[in-house]
Each structure stands twice: as C-alpha cells, then as structure tokens.
Image: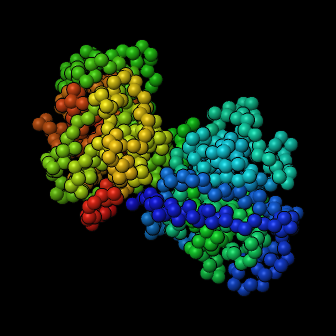
Amino acid sequence: MGMTVATPLLLCAFFIFILQVFAEKPISEAKGESVILQESIIKEVNENAKAGWKAAFNPRFSNFTVSQFKRLLGVKPPREGDLKSIPILTHPKLKNLPKEFDARTAWPQCSTIGRILDQGHCGSCWAFGAVESLSDRFCIHYGLNISLSVNDVIACCGFSCGNGCDGGSPIRAWHYFIRKGVVSEKCDPYFDNIGCSHPGCEPTYPTPQCNRKCVKENLLWSKSKHFGVNAYMISSDPYSIMTEVYKNGPVEVALNVYEDFAHYKSGVYKHVTGEYIGGHAVKLIGWGTSEEGEDYWLLVNSWNKGWGDDGYFKIRRGTNECDIESNVVAGLPSARNLNVELDDDFLNVAAEKPISEAKLESAILQDSIVKQVNENAEAGWKAAFNPQLSNFTVSQFKRLLGVKPAREGDLEGIPVLTHPRLKELPKEFDARKAWPQCSTIGKILDQGHCGSCWAFGAVESLSDRFCIHYNLSISLSVNDLLACCGFLCGSGCDGGYPIAAWRYFKRRGVVTEECDPYFDTTGCSHPGCEPLYPTPKCHRKCVKGNELWRKSKHYGVNAYRVSHDPQSIMAEVYKNGPVEVSFTVYEDFAHYKSGVYKHVTGGNMGGHAVKLIGWGTSEQGEDYWLIVNSWNRGWGEDGYFKIRRGTNECGIEHNVVAGLPSARNLNVELGDAVLDASM
C-alpha cells in the first residue's frame, strides 16, 4: 500500500552507499592540474563494442582541468542523522506503466521540464536538481509555469544544506523548501546584472551572499516564496522510481561520476574507464529502451548544451549504474502562498472568515444559539450549556480545534482505501460492543486547552486497533506525538495534520501513556491547567525510571485515507476498528447535548479531529455516525456525539484517515489477517 517507511537496515545500507560515494582516493596535484578531456578515454570508449555509448570532446569542458571538473560535482555525504527521519516511498507496480516515458511530452505545457541550465563553475548541482524538479512539479500539479531560484537555495540555506558552491545535500534542499520556501528565478536570478552567469565567470566563483531581497523592487521576497509539502527518498526499485515520475513528475537523483562521463556524447552511458571523481546530482525525467535493447533512464544535466546529447544523457536502467537508483529524492509542491483554487475539501476546514477581537473575547456558549436550535423542529438534536465549556471564550474554544488545513500535496502520496460493499454490514454498529475486551474504545479523554485533537484522534484509534488486532490492551501517548513529531506533524498545541500523525507511527512509533503521560506529576492535565498551555517539550525519556523509551514504542504499518463513500468507511471500521475523522466545527456544535447533529446556526470556528466508532439510525429515521470526542464527559452526550451520516455533514466523510498496527517491538505472532486487512 503506497508509501512504506525505511527500516533501519535500509537506511543503514543507504548511508553506507552515500559514504562510499565520497570514499575516493585523493587526486594528486599533477592529476588535478591535467585537462579532464583525454584522447585516450575517447578512444577506449569508442573502440569498445560493448560500451553502448559514444565519447567526444565536449566543448563545455574544453578548458577544464580535472580539479575544476571535480568542483562541479557538489553532492556532499549526509551528516549523521540526516536520513533517520526521511521516509522511503515505495510504489506498488502499476500495470499501466508505459515502456517509454518522457515528462516533456507527458506535460508539454511545462517548459521547465526540458530546459537545459548551466551551473557554471559552482558545485551547485545538488541545488539545481532539486529546484528544477520542484519547478516542474509546480507546473504539473498546479498549472503554474515558474522557474524557481537556485541562488536562494545555495546562498540562503547556509550550513543546513551544506556549503553552497562547495557542495550540499540534495535531501536538505527539499527540506529547505518545506521550512523556508524558495523564491522565483525572477526575484533572485542565477545571472548577475551584466548577464554573466555567476557562478561561472570565474574558475572558482564563491558562494553568493544571501540578500533576501528581490532584484526587481516591485517583487517582495516573502511573496515570491514557493513551498514544498514534504521530502522523501524513493525506493531503489526501478518500478518505484518510474511510478513516482509517472505520477508526480521529475525527481532528483545523485550518481557516481567517473572521468569517462565528462566525455559522454550519445547513447546509453555505463562506466567504461577512468577514475572516480565525485558525486553529482541531476534531474530524471523519463525512461525507455534503446534500439540495441538497453533499458535506460533519461536525464537532464546542468552543464549547458555544449555537453552530452544537447545537455541530456541516458544511463543504463535496472542495474543501479553508478548507484543512480540508490539515491532518488523528491517532494510535493505546496499551495501555500499560491493564488490557485484547491480542490481538496479538507482545505475548506479552516477557511473561516477572520473573527473580530470583540467576538473572540465573548463567551462561546450563547442563549440565542441554544434557543434557535431547540426551537427548530427540523434540527434533530438538542442544545444546552455544556459545563465543560462554561468559562470558554470563542478564542479559547477555537484553540481546541487543532486540525490545520492540509498542505496541498500532503494527501497525494497517501493511498485511498476503497472497500467493496460488504453484504454482512449491520444496520447498527458500536465498536464498544463488537470488541468489549478493548476498554480504550469507549474511553473519554480531555485535551485540556491544547489544540491536540489531531493527535488524540490518531492515538486513540491506534490504541484501539492494537487491542483489536493483537489483543493488547494499551493506552498510547498523545504527549509523545504532540511533543516529539515536531514540524512534520504541525505545531503541537497550535494544531497539526491527522495524516502526519499516522505517518509518525510508521516512522518513529509512539510510546505508552504510562511511559509519557498527558497528565503531569501534580495530577493536573497539562495542557489544560492554563488557558494557553504551550506545547510540552520532547524528552524521549519515560517518567518511570525502569522503563526504556525505545522499548515502549509501538508502531504503525501504514497510513491511508478511506474513501468518502459511507459504505467504505463502515467496512473499514467493521473490519479494522475505529478511525480518525476531521470535520468543520461551527458555533452551534459547542452546545451539542443529544440527538443527531447537523449544522443549524453560527459561524465556522475551525477544523476538529475525533474518533469514529460506529453508526446507526435514530428513532426519527436519521442515519448517523457514532463518535468519541476529547472534551471530557461534561460536553455532549457524556462525551460522545452523533452526526448525520451519508450527506458529508460538515465534511466529515471526506476526511477519514487510519492505519494498521505493527507487530514490531511486540512479543506476538503475526497473523495473515492483519497483514491482509488493508489490501
């Protein structure tokens, strides 16, 4: 199913590979000062009947020494820990993958895909490969033809990315897109004001300074920023790489470069002769098979049109030639800062109009709302002054609603699970009764004054699923997720992304509530004691000295969305247990007491995440979902509520996420049913 996260073994193997890339012997001074283009290499390649490619004196390097050529190869080895939190995306093999594919013809409206650039004398290939790929993806996913700035990345990412013109880390460039964004080429061009490519005019041009100011005064730096949603590696399986390019667009790849590569002119490259020089990053845009039957990757280089096949090259596919299939990175573009129309219903969750200061300071519970609901014969539910929110202002109530609007693209790499219609689905279902041994299912918790609903919904559902699938009665820690997932999940008590929580379970796992409780040592719910309690710090240490943090971790197998078809949602809950759902909350929801909720009155307050545990039909014939909230028992129907089913009330059927529990770290035997449950 969709994305799988790297095991420690996979990451270890990857780390060893990338270190080997830079384990070359030092080049002697005499060798460094010799010219890179050699007649002997051209002769050896062209006289080799099995080479599969032709060599030539590429004019791009006519005056380059080996030392200058080596400087272009700017892929640095990762620092320790760089890859630990990076997901590895593995795509299932698609039946409809074409034998040949060229992103230029697949998306002809995107002129950036086939553009050949020149990095000059600067070792900025790591930034070029990333920026070019992201530019292409903005066009593919948003119809936005834009060239993004390499200068921004090499000048402003700083030590976080590497050393600018002296090399950097491809995956760090993609992380920079998430954290800081990247401006347009128009704002911060790679060419200076006299039209000379800088870096490029000098043999060793220094890294440009970061000015954070557009060259054109009518452009604002902050307004010119374009962001990424995520950063991930792609499995070295060629079909996974092909699927990623086919679905999402060009990717950045790094490869080992040998002396003969400088002489490439045409054909399908494979290493024939010459010493290893360094690591280089380029953009992969397609694949095919040569007339001689050699499978290849199609790539765009950043050495201008005076090198290779008019700036492009092909390299052998399926054999990990020069380790090219072992280092593939990418990410999805974000709608942040864009004036584009988003189709995803989820983004509407937080699309409320700004609320006045006076309104924010007013009480959330209002007589007028209670009256309007209770006097409406068609409402189908009753309103009341819920004691849990008796002292809450509108501002404090809004803070509970911690579902952030999805970063566009967050959900594109997530599989959508559609269940076939089950004949045995009951008309009414309650997970508490279906799995009575699982006490966590019906447990009502309290998120306090923290916007941690996104974490509660996920952790509660996963706790239930550990009991259902492994007969393990355990309460998992909201605190771990809230404090330790960091920006990948959102902003802790200031809100987060439900699907990111499920991804965290796969990558990092989550400890038990006993190891890292939501309540502090004085028994006061933290967050909860203060009106605006800050996100707790991540300590990665169990409160009980005899428990080990890593031994207390419980993992997820996968993360997926469930199709918004009510029958699919019902089948998922029936087969696998409770799910996390998000929906738009209006003012009247704060007053819910009983019945089947549907929006009657009041403004949009924000997005909220809860746990769906069943369904049924009211005495009045209204189909409903049965849901557990995290606002204690002083709200609603003893902490529960029902909401109209089958009409996507408040967007609740369009935002269903879940995942299966993993046996990793557990002393249990795996059953086939668990492994097959999501297929």
Residue at the spot 82% in from the left edge and 49% down from the top edge: 205
Judging depth in this view, the residue of 282 and 26 nearest the camera is 26
Residue 474 lies, in percent from the top left, at 25, 47
Residue at the spot 41% in from the left edge and 48% down from the top edge: 504
| For residue 667, above or below residue 530 | below
Q: Give the side of residue 453 with respect to residue 20, left or right.
A: left
Residue 365 seen in this snapshot: yes
| For residue 55, above or below residue 87 | below
Judging depth in this view, the residue of 255 and 434 nearest the camera is 255
Residue 393: name its quadrant. Answer: top left
For the C terminus, give its image quadrant. Answer: bottom left
Residue 313 lies, in percent from the top left, at 70, 68
Residue 666 lies, in percent from the top left, at 30, 58
| For residue 336, above or below residue 243 | above
Q: Give the side of residue 62 with respect to residue 297, left or right.
A: right
Furthest residue to the left? 619
Residue 297 lies, in percent from the top left, at 62, 69
**Numbered circles on residues, count:** 0
For the N terminus, give its image quadrant. Answer: bottom left
Judging depth in this view, the residue of 596 and 162 nearest the camera is 162
Residue at the spot 19% in from the left edge and 41% down from the top edge: 442
Residue at the spot 70% in from the left edge and 81% down from the top edge: 51
Q: How is the image coloured?
A: rainbow
Furthest residue to the front? 546
Residue 129: name its quadrant. Answer: bottom right
Residue 652 seen in this snapshot: no
Q: Give the side of residue 392 with respect to residue 312, left or right.
A: left
